[in-house]
Amino acid sequence: MTTPARSRAAGLAGALFVLMAVVVTVYVATAPVSRAAGRDAANAADRAVKRGAAAAIASTVAPAGDSTTLVPVPSQGTLPPTVPSSSPVPPTSAVTPAPPPPPTDAPPTTTPPTTAPPTTAPPAGAPSVAPAPATPASAPLPPAASAPSPVPHVVGLVGDSLAFAAGGAIDPAFRAAGLRAILDLAPGRRIDVRNDSVHASAGLEAVRGVAAFRPEVMIVQLGTNDVFFDAPDRDRYVALISSVLDEIGRDVPTVWVNVWRTDQPVASQLFDDVLQQSAALDLNLHVADWAAVARAEPVLRPDGVHPNGFGDTRFARTMVDATALAVLAHH
């Protein structure tokens, strides 16, 4: 081998030795091993590099008789990789010496822990409990309004001596039924006063006065004296009853207490028949059937006209029951 050839071979071998030393140093510095194992690996690699370099120099020259054949060596820009593909070596134009390994007494490098945001998950093994829904603050209840007292129904009563005698039982009976009565009662009262009855009270005038208060229901207890003084006359009874209803007003509910006298049975019955026929034609007219009570029960005094002590209560009860029905019928 000529001297120039030997010089080129030696230069290539030296370059290869330096490159392998750099690669091994980088690999050892980046490998995740302990510092002691890194120093041992670096020493072993250094010895292997030296042996490999000697072998590379010897392999560049091969005897072939009296002449030598040069083994082609790749140029510096096309050297094959000498490290795993997972750790590529960046191409460099100049060889930089590897930094020395860190001292063994350096404190270990610690990575600050990542602070995770607090969670509301319960600890492991703890039973999962759903949070209780918030209880809305209950507004104070308004004080319970007391039920208003029922307004009494106002009724008007115009009567003769029967109602006048039973007055002590009539007013309490009306109040017990929730009715407030406007009373105009007088003994000897007749519907219409004639010249021969100068001492009688005119029923029409009393009806007019009570109706002026506009009660919800009008109660008429008249006719007892009319059937006594006048001969039975249907047409006259029709006229008397019509005059009272016209004075009250045909649109006002009216209760009329019918008549019973033991001394005038025919006239009493005729008057009651006319009254019942009028009620059949007028939906606002209701009949309180006192005659049926008086004929069936011992409610009359010896005169056969006025109620006795027991009769007062039954008389009042008969009027109140019929009036309550009339109030219900028109509300």
Image (tube, rainbow, N blue to C red):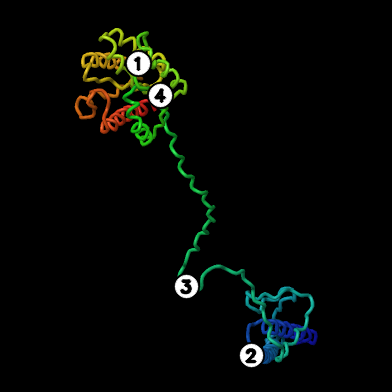
Give the distance between the C-alpha atoms of the residues marked 4 and 3, in whole angstroms. Answer: 88 Å
- Viewer-closest of 246 and 74: 246
- Frontmost of labels 1 and 2 is 1
Q: Nearer the viewer, mark 2 or mark 4?
A: 4
Going by the image, does 29 lie left or right of 11?
left
Residue 216 drawn above or below residue 23: above
Q: Pinpoint residue 215: horizontal percent, then vertical percent.
A: 43, 25
Q: Earlier in the sequence, mark 4 or mark 3?
A: 3
Task: Residue under label 3, please give it.
Answer: 126
- Real-space Cα separation, disc 2 to disc 3, in angstroms: 46 Å
Which mark, residue 37? 2
Quarter of the image that includes the C terminus = top left
279, above or below 309, in the image: above
Task: Give left or right: position of 286 versus 80.
Answer: left
Find the distance from the CA under tag 1 to the CA under tag 3.
Answer: 98 Å
- Element on which disc 1 rests: loop
Whole-percent x, y for residue 106 in the image: 72, 89
* Local SS, label 4: strand
Residue at numbered disc 1: 190
Report if the CB atoms under discs 2 and 3 are less than 8 Å apart.
no
